[in-house]
Image (tube, rainbow, N blue to C red):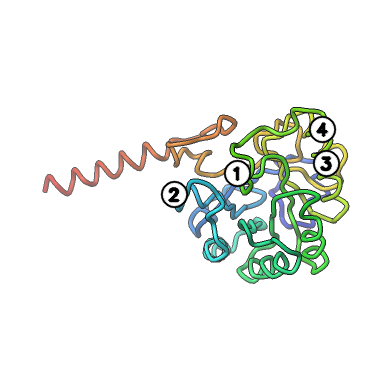
Amino acid sequence: MSLPLQSLGDLPARKRGGPPLAVLTAYDFGSARLLDEAGVDLLLVGDSLGMVVHGLPDTTGVTMEMMLLHTRAVCRAQPRSPVIADLPYASYDSPAQALASAQSLMQAGANAVKLEGGCRVLPQVQAIVAAGIPVCGHIGMLPQSIAEEGAYRRKGRTQDQAQALLEDAEALDRAGVMAMVLESVVESVAAEITKRVSCCTIGIGSGPDNNGQVLVTHDVIGAFPWFRPPFAQARADCAAEIRRAAAAYIKSVREV
């Protein structure tokens, strides 16, 4: 059995020889410790916390203050797994703002930052990389762009979309990202991107032919039963167990 990733410097070797990276989200001290003990390769403090922790309708309401709070909580667990923190919506509109935001997350304990977009955010990526901060890209379906797009749609269905994704991926790769998330990308396109770029690709709803996979932990453990994307298989039913345990406690108190 292969050892979990020890540092971001091990990513090139995992690109070349595997095994695929197993990545999960963490938003607090306890979950970070448990996932790290389970052997996860990378922990992502994702802005998905807006929905599964704070009850927001999408990620656009997540603030830098929220990301810093959760990043600090995760990093207090002192995980072996490197921690990637999302740059939230409207925190990287310019290269200067992107760098300042990235520096804040690094000061909170993150080992790398992630931002959404390809060629349009290239100056921001270049500014962060130039400052020595590892960057994870994110292309395909972009949750922070929901207001512009109107719906979450699979990307790469047309030849033009596929070509644009390839151009975005290659531009980010040249800019020096250490990895990139491919979200809801047509499987054949994700596979082609993975072949063309030198960095690791991490898929979510983009088929098996990436260098790794990422999921929201709440989806994996069945802790958010009100919505789960079709590509996320629940490996447990924590929601049912919480309800059962709470009901048992309530009953014990009332029957005294």
Q: How many neighbours does mark 3 have within 10 angstroms: few (below 14), some (14-19), or many (20 or more)?
A: few
Numbered tag placed on residue 17 in the rendering: 3
Residue type of the residue flagged with mark 3: Gly
Q: Of label 1 and label 4, which has the lower sequence position? A: 1
Point out residue 134 in the picture as x, y percentages from the top left corner: 76, 60
Q: How many neighbours does mark 4 have within 10 angstroms: few (below 14), some (14-19), or many (20 or more)?
A: few
Residue type of the residue flagged with mark 2: Gly
Q: Of label 2 and label 1, which has the lower sequence position? A: 2
Residue drawn 52% across and 52% down? Answer: 49
Numbered tag placed on residue 160 in the rendering: 4
Residue drawn 76% across and 55% down? Answer: 121
Mark 4 secondary-structure assignment: helix
- Labels 2, 1: front one: 1
Q: Nearer the viewer, residue 166 or 81?
A: 166
Alpha carbon distance from label 2 to label 1? 16 Å
Alpha carbon distance from label 1 to label 3? 36 Å
Alpha carbon distance from label 4 to label 2? 35 Å
Alpha carbon distance from label 1 to label 4? 20 Å
Residue type of the residue flagged with mark 1: Ile
Q: How many neighbours does mark 2 have within 10 angstroms: few (below 14), some (14-19), or many (20 or more)?
A: few
Point out residue 167 in the picture as x, y percentages from the top left corner: 85, 42
Mark 3 secondary-structure assignment: helix
Q: Which residue is mark 2?
A: 55
Q: Is residue 80 visible?
A: no
